[in-house]
Image (cartoon, rainbow, N blue to C red):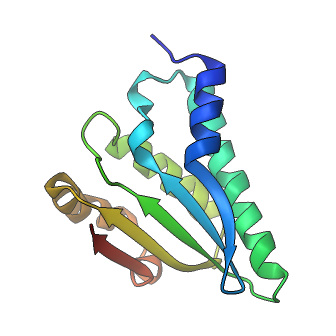
Amino acid sequence: MPIEYDHLVNIMQQNIYAHEKDNYGHAYVIIKEFTPNIYNKKQKEMLIQFIVDVVKKSLALSQKYNKKTSYVHLYLTNCNRRNFNLAWFKKVNHILTNTFEDTLESLYLYSDSNLFSNLWKLVKNFIDKETREKIVLIKC
């Protein structure tokens, strides 16, 4: 059963946001509250658009300081099979890669699960080499 619209909007606003730090924009995405497998197509599209909008906000913050890149912080703490879906990741990655070419300063991936270590071996193959070099894995 799909999640209620208002509830999903509330989760997005609390867990996906932009912040200014050290003259750069930073986009934060905290995955643990999301369960893509229960969202309908419209909700998934809404979530992707929200992420795109937040990345745009982080780039706008960087542009105030004449910077063309921003940072992304992806929190995969408490990540499990319920809230991480490889097909979903590939789709979001494809959209972000095509929408934001050469705008990533660094991507910090935070995780506390062994599942992520195993998933990373698969996921990294879907990320281009230049972007992969900007990814910092942080075990929490």
Vertical arrangement, residue 86 with respect to residue 5, above or below: below
**Quarter where residue 82 is shown:** top left
Q: Is residue 119 left or right of residue 14?
A: left
Residue drawn at point x = 30 percent, y = 66 percent: 125
Residue drawn at point x = 44 percent, y = 32 percent: 36
Residue drawn at point x = 40 percent, y = 84 percent: 133
Vertical arrangement, residue 19 with respect to residue 80, above or below: below
Instruction: Indicate the position of residue 117 as horizontal and vertical percent values.
Output: 18, 62
Instruction: Indicate the position of residue 105 as horizontal and vertical percent values.
Output: 57, 82
Instruction: Indicate the position of residue 2 as horizontal and vertical percent values.
Output: 50, 15
Instruction: Indicate the position of residue 75 as horizontal and vertical percent values.
Output: 41, 58
Vertical arrangement, residue 6 with respect to residue 113, above or below: above
Residue drawn at point x = 24 percent, y = 38 percent: 81
Task: Assign the N terminus to one quadrant of the image.
Answer: top left
Task: Assign the C terminus to one quadrant of the image.
Answer: bottom left
Whether residue 99 is visible to the viewer of this picture, yes or no, is: no
Whether residue 43 is visible to the viewer of this picture, yes or no, is: yes
**Quarter where residue 100 is shown:** bottom right
Please, which residue is most extreme toward the top here?
Answer: 1
